[in-house]
Image (cartoon, rainbow, N blue to C red):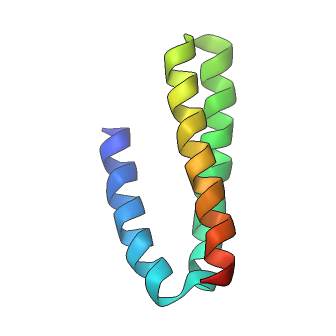
Amino acid sequence: MTLLLLAVLLWQLARLANRDPAGARPLIASLFLAYLGFTILCGCISSLRPAAFSAAVAICLALAFTSARTG
């Protein structure tokens, strides 16, 4: 359910980033920090697979944050 919510949020965020890249940056940064923490939490208490997936999402969000700077 959480991944479905993330997919919907990122879909809406993509439309916002097309219109106003600078306005989308705080939302992208918040999601990045949340997934960075989730990656650490998964690495400490779970197996490697959930941590690797969360790390992949965090990397994608970091790339989105840097690309939203220029538009």
Q: At 46% across and 89% down in the image, what residue appears? A: 19
Left or right: where does residue 59 sit relative to residue 15? right
Q: Quadrant of the C terminus?
A: bottom right
- Residue sitting at 55 percent across and 38 percent down? 56
Measured from the top left, where is residue 3 in percent x and y? 36, 41
Residue at horizontal 58 percent and vertical 63 percent from the top: 64
Between 39 and 55, which is closer to the camera in this rendering? 55
Q: Where is residue 23 in the image (x, y as percent from the top left)?
A: 59, 83
**Which residue shows up at 63% across the image and 52% down it?**
32
Location of residue 42 (image quadrant): top right
Q: In this view, does 46 lie above or below 70?
A: above
Let me know if residue 30 appears in the view: no
Relative height, residue 51 to residue 45 (above, below): below
Q: Is residue 50 visible?
A: yes
Q: Is residue 29 left or right of residue 9?
A: right
Residue 13: image quadrant is bottom left
Label tally: 0
From what the image shows, is residue 40 above or below residue 5? above
State which quarter of the image contains the N terminus. Answer: top left
Specify the farthest residue to the bottom: 19
Q: Position of residue 65 (x, y in %)?
A: 65, 65
Quarter residue 16 falls in = bottom left
